[in-house]
């Protein structure tokens, strides 16, 4: 049908009446919702759905709910203006009964809101003591009151699909162990239902009694690969294979030539080289548990080992001597540090609210963070580590990433305040001499260790270079393309780093051993159950 690489765009969802499918796909103009009637091969782009993700249908198949621009929206399926229902930061799925919509913000419980809008209220609560860190992907049962959802947890004893109800008469209980997003499928012309889940990399169906809310019977393997799935009441099933779970840490020179690989493919979210060139600090994610830990890799022998005791690390940054790492646990909201060689204990530094740690001053006394204001716009703030007293740098847009020059004099950051993502540069901390330095789009700035070169990723994914040496300043400092990258997921940052002398780069690239991202369609999946 179509190919796409965005994991968080959501499952391709089939209308309850089985007439058509809607899916969020990436285009050169950004993500959009596309409709495809099942009797046609033509994809129809839905205008007014730019940046849309995680669509879901109304029960009458006449409207579509989706998330875009930090908001929950609804739109007529066959054309018309969208309606904003409420703000939602980092959504993780939604569903719709007659007059109620359930939706899941990341790292929180399930919320409900009237289908016409209003005030959103929570209907489930995380059990942090049991290791739960996110309720997501709600699915209504046919009675429109009870619903299922996936509880992500650091413990296998609590992870799985749970049953609850809007009126809270249904006592919460786990009905099945599963590995993530799932669907409730019906056998046409019967009252039989099956839970269609991801189990050990396969797509599996197991009987589910909607009356007593219990799974039963044998598991049936539908497909030997898994992904994000939806099903209709007509026996149709759609699947988007997970193509972007893994990335590879690849070394390349300034011409883009392949120099080698660090470690094995995994779900990496950040890699940063120590200033002394001895180690790489990595943020590594376990999608099943939601755990993010900081790791280090020795460049002498390639050995990787866990660095952080904290298990929800969202950013790591080196001290300028390369001896210590600072990192934040976004659940505990605490800043930690740890010496790397020799390995020291994990030290609590300071309680710190939301925001990615993106820089330390050369003396290690000042920290810079990026914070989201509303899920759409961001700000940059800096403070002495102790005591904290934040100073605001308003980027007036979404911040792609921020990079403090190693000499501590200049701050580079990405912002879409002009209508597209560009890289800006200003003196730090005064923020004087603010100017745009990218041409035709840019994000994710990174510095050479002597602060003489600044690199960034252009809109076409080329790695660009700005030379700040005296000779180049006299020539106007035009950015120069080095090579075209193949970064794993352009929505994450930083996705690469540069060696201290600027001679080579470490990039988080798409894992070429994984094919997929295709949207597959099974028109009569119950027929497989008899095999």
Image (tube, rainbow, N blue to C red):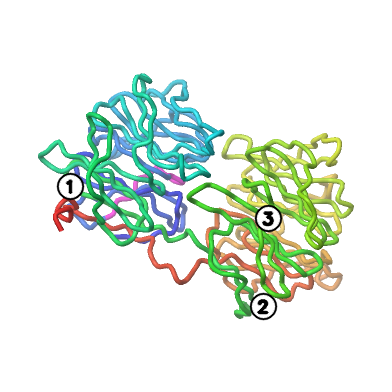
Residue picked out by circle 2: 253
**Residue 514 point in image, percent of width and height:** 43, 67
Mark 2 or 3, nearer chain start: 2
- Secondary structure at badge 1 equals loop
Furthest-left residue in this view? 189
Residue picked out by circle 1: 235
Say which residue appears at 47% left-offset and 39% top-offset.
91
Say which residue appears at 57% left-offset and 38% top-offset.
375
Furthest-right residue in this view? 363
Residue picked out by circle 3: 423
In the picture, the quarter occupied by the N terminus is bottom left
Discs 3/1, front: 1
- When the figure is inspected, residue 258 is found, relative to residue 124, above or below; the finding is below
Image quadrant where residue 2 sits: bottom left
Say which residue appears at 44% left-offset and 25% top-offset.
123
- Secondary structure at badge 3 equals strand
Seen in the image, is 1 located left or right of residue 367? Answer: left
**Residue 504 point in image, percent of width and height:** 70, 74
**Residue 502 point in image, percent of width and height:** 75, 72
**Residue 465 point in image, percent of width and height:** 70, 68
The residue stretch that appears in magenta = 43-52
- Secondary structure at badge 2 equals strand
Mark 1 or 2, nearer chain start: 1
Q: Is residue 431 visible?
A: yes
- Give the CA distance from mark 2 to mark 3: 23 Å
Mark 3 or 1, nearer chain start: 1
Discs 2/3, front: 2
């Amino acid at each position: 049908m179509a190919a796409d690489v965005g994991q968080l765009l959501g499952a391709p969802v089939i209308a309850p009446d089985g007439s058509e499918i809607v899916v969020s796909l990436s285009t050169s103009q950004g993500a959009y919702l596309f409709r495809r009637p099942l009797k046609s091969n033509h994809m129809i782009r839905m205008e007014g759905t730019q940046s849309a993700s995680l669509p879901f249908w109304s029960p009458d198949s006449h409207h579509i709910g989706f998330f875009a621009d930090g908001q929950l929206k609804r739109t007529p399926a066959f054309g018309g203006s969208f309606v904003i229902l409420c703000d939602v930061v980092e959504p993780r799925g939604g569903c719709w009964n007659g007059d109620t919509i359930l939706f899941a913000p990341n790292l929180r419980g399930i919320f409900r809101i009237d289908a016409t809008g209003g005030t959103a209220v929570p209907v489930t609560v995380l059990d942090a003591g049991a290791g739960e860190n996110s309720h997501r992907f709600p699915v209504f049962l046919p009675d429109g009151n009870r619903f299922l959802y996936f509880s992500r947890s650091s413990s296998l004893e609590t992870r799985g699909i749970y049953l609850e109800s809007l009126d809270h008469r249904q006592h919460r209980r786990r009905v099945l162990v599963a590995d993530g997003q799932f669907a409730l499928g019906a056998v046409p012309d019967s009252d039989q239902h099956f839970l269609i889940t991801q189990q050990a990399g396969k797509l599996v169906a197991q009987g589910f009694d909607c009356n007593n809310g219990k799974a039963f019977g044998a598991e049936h393997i539908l497909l030997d690969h898994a992904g994000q799935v939806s099903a209709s009441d007509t026996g149709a099933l759609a699947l988007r294979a997970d193509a972007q779970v893994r990335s590879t840490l690849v070394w390349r020179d300034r011409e883009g030539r392949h120099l080698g690989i660090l470690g094995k493919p995994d779900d990496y979210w950040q890699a940063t080289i120590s200033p002394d060139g001895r180690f790489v600090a990595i943020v590594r994610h376990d999608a099943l548990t939601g755990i993010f830990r900081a790791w280090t890799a020795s460049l002498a022998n390639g050995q990787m080992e866990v660095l952080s005791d904290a298990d929800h690390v969202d950013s790591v940054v080196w001290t300028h001597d390369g001896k210590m790492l600072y990192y934040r646990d976004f659940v505990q909201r605490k800043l930690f540090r740890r010496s790397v060689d020799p390995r020291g204990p994990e030290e609590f530094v300071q309680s710190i609210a939301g925001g990615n740690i993106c820089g330390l001053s050369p003396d290690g006394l000042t920290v810079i963070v990026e914070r989201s204001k509303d899920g759409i716009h961001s700000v940059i703030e800096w403070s002495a580590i102790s005591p904290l007293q934040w100073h605001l740098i308003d980027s007036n847009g979404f911040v792609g990433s921020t990079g403090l020059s190693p000499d501590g004099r200049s701050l580079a950051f990405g912002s879409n305040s002009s209508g597209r993502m560009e890289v800006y540069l200003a003196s730090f901390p005064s923020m004087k001499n603010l100017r745009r330095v990218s041409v035709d789009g840019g994000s994710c700035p990174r510095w050479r260790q002597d602060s003489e070169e600044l690199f960034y990723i252009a809109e076409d994914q080329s790695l660009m270079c700005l030379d700040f040496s005296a000779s180049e300043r006299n020539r106007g400092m035009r950015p120069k393309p080095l090579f075209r990258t193949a970064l794993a997921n352009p929505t994450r940052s930083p996705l690469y780093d540069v060696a201290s002398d600027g001679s080579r780069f470490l990039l988080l690239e798409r894992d070429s051993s994984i094919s997929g991202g295709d949207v597959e369609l099974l028109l009569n999946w119950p027929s497989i159950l008899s095999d």
